[in-house]
């Protein structure tokens, strides 16, 4: 399973990896909008931009969603098993597993709490 | 209270007159000034005269930094509120009806014998340490290097009104016609620079309440009035520390 | 101990009840229609049109005031030369500085939780400083001279000079920072963000010092105000970013993702802390003032039991500080709707906070202590129609530019992670 990985602080002067295992991937952000149907979305101010900025528009969980064309670069890590996760935690100290910004490829984020994760 | 008889003839006056000039002189030598007399003249109230008589401690050595160092001494009890000073000022300096450069304030003094009211003329105090000059963002108001008068450079005034708030004496107002803050400048442009010796208000005063002159000249009347030993001299709002050059006295 | 637990349970129960009853009532229907209105294509442009009309009307009112002369148009007097326009200017620049600080926590110091609000905060800090400058343009009697003599005849001892100059520099830095954020050059954006932060804080403490250095005005004089202004700015910035982020999401209908919720939670907590700081400062301001000189006591009496008592107790204390604090405390910043409610109350009340700060400092005349008849009472000030129109123009500019910003910059979606 692919996790977005981050620390509590972000370096803005360079794209620094939060941990040695992380790789930088291009991810596809999902653009959820809080209306129930595509029909309803048509009357909205954001509709044109939303249509133009994404593909595969669909209804999902009482919301509409599309895959954004503009990809974002994110540091990610592949974790396949609980053991791997636990050994990762042992190496980097406290971690928080949380929902990430929604991506097609990943939906969870590991936030390294301590200094070890820069 | 009915039975108490007061022997008015023999009552000793509890006023400043009961202190002899000699006594005052002695006090002044040690830097104190007598401000009141209590208990039949036996208890004197004295304060340091350092700050009230001199514009700042540095000038205590009878030195005033400007030449001429213009100042005004107001003999408060002589003011009768005839307002000729205000009329003269208005006429001389084109003061609009909505503003004033000088004004006479009225105070109820119920305790004073024979008098119910006091009149207190106020105007710009041409402070030695002027808060308005410090506050001005464009140096539109300046302390004249020669005379110590606080002057306006109207063309530079942006009308932020910070100086109006900085002034401890409410001496400033915004003049629409000049598009600038206006204030008393001891008639610098209208009279003094033309060779006149007095401000319009001082010249118009019929009772000698307003006395104008050069404080740096020991022979001038104002110098003598400030440095006399007979009477208390004070300034308005000394706590602000602006070191004003308008002095008040009585008698 | 047991009592305390009970108490907190009770409070959260009340909040839950409140939320539930809000959800079930017709109010919610009305409210969700209103919220739906924000994102509607037609209604958005209607709103935008109304915003532009408001700006137009306000500006016309301001130019009319300019034409007939500020002395006739405005309610300010010799005794109270600074009125609602100065307080509105302060309201806007305090908000701008606060937004700058909030954005800098993320974008300069790299705190991840503040990152999602950065872009909107930087944009709004530019918007609010522009609104502030617009208001001050119609307050200053000779704005053209200001532009000229600020440069060729600087009064270096004047806090107004420093404030004006530094805010000009600040605005420049913030605009450049925003451009670099848009260009995705975060390295340069960070440097300009830091420069903007330094200029903004220096400018803002000078704004406090304008009042704090008036030794003729006892109510303001002292080092209190520069400090208070910075703390107050951060409080305003937090409230404003919560307020506008929520509205922005209602326009774009975007789902708030977890990082954004976390961000608003962090901002809410900071906001709560700053409310506590401001309450603390206010309490000590009053207590120290009550043993001060008669002028200060007179002003405080007017504030607490006199003509400004409603403003102080109801608007400033209750709506501005205490109720929002309770809302933040009980919802722990996790309920976005509640945070929005609290922040909306704060933004509304902070406007009056600035008004009271400016006006109450002037109501005691300088000759009050002299005991003369002319200055026996307190000076009074009421804003006039023209002054209110200038305020409306400032608020209109903020609202309109916010709407345009949400549309043009697509909800200020942040690409920084």
Image (spheres, rainbow, N blue to C red):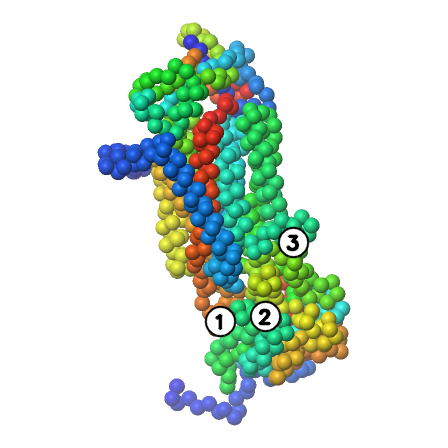
Residue B169 lies, with reference to residue C139, above or below; the image says below
Q: Residue A14, position in %: x, y? A: 59, 21
The lab-note entry on whether marks 1 and 3 share a chain reads no
Does dot 1 land on a helix, a strand or a loop?
helix
Of labels 1 and 3, the one closer to you: 3
Few, some or many C-alpha atoms within 10 Å of disc 2 (few <14, some 14-19, many ≥20)? many
* Residue corresponding to mark 2: B95
**Subunit that carries the residue with mark 2:** B
Q: Residue C284, position in %: x, y? A: 47, 50
Residue C138 lies, with reference to residue C379, above or below; the image says above
Give the quadrant of the C terminus of chain B: bottom right
In this view, the residue in front, B23 or C48, is: C48
Left or right: C111 as drawn, with respect to B213 = left
Q: Which mark is residue B138?
A: 3
Left or right: C303 as drawn, with respect to B20 = left
- Residue B41 falls in image quadrant: bottom right
Q: Residue furthest bottom?
A: B9
Does dot 3 land on a helix, a strand or a loop?
loop
Left or right: B221 as drawn, with respect to A25 = right
Q: Residue C153, position in %: x, y? A: 68, 52
**Subunit that carries the residue with mark 1:** C
Give the quadrant of the N terminus of chain B: bottom left
Question: How far is disc 2 from disc 1 in space, using C-alphas?
Answer: 20 Å
- Residue C54 falls in image quadrant: top left
Question: How far is disc 2 from disc 3 in space, using C-alphas?
Answer: 24 Å
Q: Number of callouts in the render? A: 3
Name which residue lies at 67% across and 48% down.
C151
Name which residue lies at 59% across and 70% down.
B95
* Residue corresponding to mark 1: C374
Name which residue lies at 62% across and 59% down.
B132
């Amino acid at each position: 399973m692919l996790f977005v990985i981050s620390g509590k602080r972000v370096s803005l002067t360079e794209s620094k990896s939060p941990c040695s295992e992380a790789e930088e991937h291009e991810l596809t952000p999902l653009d959820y909008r809080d209306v129930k149907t595509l029909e309803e979305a048509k009357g909205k101010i954001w509709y044109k931009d939303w249509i133009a900025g994404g593909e595969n528009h669909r209804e999902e969980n009482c919301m509409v969603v599309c895959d954004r064309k503009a990809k974002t670069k994110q540091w990610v890590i592949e974790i396949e098993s609980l053991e791997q996760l636990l050994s990762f935690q042992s190496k980097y100290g406290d971690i928080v597993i949380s929902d990430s910004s929604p991506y097609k490829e990943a939906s969870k984020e590991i936030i390294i709490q301590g200094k070890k994760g820069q | 209270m009915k039975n108490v008889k007061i022997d008015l003839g023999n009552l000793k006056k509890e006023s400043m007159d009961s202190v002899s000039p000699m006594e005052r002189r002695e006090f002044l030598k040690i830097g104190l000034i007598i401000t009141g007399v209590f208990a039949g003249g036996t208890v004197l109230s004295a304060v340091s005269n350092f700050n009230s008589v001199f514009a700042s401690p540095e000038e205590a050595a009878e030195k005033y930094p400007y030449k001429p160092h213009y100042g005004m001494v107001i003999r408060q009890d002589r003011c009768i509120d005839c307002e000729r000073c205000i009329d003269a000022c208005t006429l001389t300096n084109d003061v609009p009806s909505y503003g004033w450069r000088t004004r006479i304030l009225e105070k109820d003094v119920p305790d004073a014998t024979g008098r119910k009211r006091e009149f207190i003329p106020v105007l710009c105090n041409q402070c030695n340490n002027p808060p308005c000059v410090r506050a001005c963002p464009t140096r539109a108001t300046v302390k004249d290097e020669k005379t110590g008068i606080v002057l306006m450079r109207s063309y530079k005034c942006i009308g932020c009104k910070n100086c109006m708030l900085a002034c401890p004496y409410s001496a400033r107002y915004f003049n629409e016609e000049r598009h600038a803050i206006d204030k008393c400048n001891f008639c610098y442009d209208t009279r003094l620079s033309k060779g006149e010796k007095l401000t319009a208000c001082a010249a118009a005063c019929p009772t000698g309440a307003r006395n104008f002159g050069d404080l740096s000249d020991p022979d001038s009347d104002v110098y003598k009035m400030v440095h006399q030993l007979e009477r208390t001299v004070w300034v308005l709002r000394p706590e602000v520390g602006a070191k004003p050059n308008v002095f008040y006295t009585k008698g | 101990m047991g009592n305390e637990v009970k108490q907190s349970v009770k409070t959260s129960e009340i909040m839950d009840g409140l939320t539930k009853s809000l959800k079930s009532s017709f109010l919610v229907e009305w409210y969700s229609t209103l919220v739906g209105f924000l994102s509607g294509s037609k209604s958005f442009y209607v709103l935008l049109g109304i915003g532009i009309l408001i700006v137009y009307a306000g500006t016309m009112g301001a130019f009319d005031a300019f034409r007939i002369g500020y002395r006739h148009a405005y309610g300010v007097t010799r005794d109270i030369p600074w009125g609602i326009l100065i307080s509105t200017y302060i309201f806007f620049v305090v908000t701008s500085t606060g937004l700058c600080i909030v954005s800098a926590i993320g974008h300069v110091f790299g705190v991840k939780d503040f990152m999602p609000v950065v872009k909107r905060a930087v944009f709004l800090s530019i918007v609010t400083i522009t609104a502030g400058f617009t208001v001050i343009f119609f307050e200053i009697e000779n704005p053209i001279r200001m532009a000229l003599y600020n440069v060729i005849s600087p009064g270096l001892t004047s806090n107004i000079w420093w404030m004006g100059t530094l805010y000009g520099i600040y605005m420049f830095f913030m605009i450049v920072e925003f451009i670099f954020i848009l260009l995705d050059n975060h390295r340069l954006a960070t440097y300009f963000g830091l420069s903007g932060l330094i200029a903004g804080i220096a400018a803002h403490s000078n704004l406090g010092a304008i009042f704090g250095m008036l030794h003729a005005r006892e109510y303001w004089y002292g080092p209190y105000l520069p400090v208070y202004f910075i703390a107050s700015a951060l409080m305003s910035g937090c409230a404003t970013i919560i307020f506008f982020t929520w509205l922005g999401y209602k326009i774009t209908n975007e789902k708030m993702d977890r990082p954004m919720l976390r961000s608003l939670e962090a901002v809410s907590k900071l906001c709560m802390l700053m409310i506590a700081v401001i309450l603390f400062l206010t309490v000590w301001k009053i207590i120290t003032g009550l043993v001060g000189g008669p002028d200060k006591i007179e002003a405080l009496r007017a504030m607490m039991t006199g003509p400004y008592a409603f403003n102080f107790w109801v608007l400033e204390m209750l709506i501005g500080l205490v109720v929002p604090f309770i809302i933040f405390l009980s919802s722990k910043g996790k309920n976005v709707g509640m945070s929005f409610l609290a922040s909306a109350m704060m933004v509304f009340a902070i406007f009056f906070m600035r008004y009271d700060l400016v006006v109450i400092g002037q109501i005691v005349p300088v000759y009050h202590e002299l005991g003369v008849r002319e200055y026996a009472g307190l000076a009074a000030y009421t804003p006039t129609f023209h002054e209110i129109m200038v305020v409306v123009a400032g608020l209109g500019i903020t609202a309109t530019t916010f709407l345009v910003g949400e549309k043009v910059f697509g909800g200020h979606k942040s690409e920084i992670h």
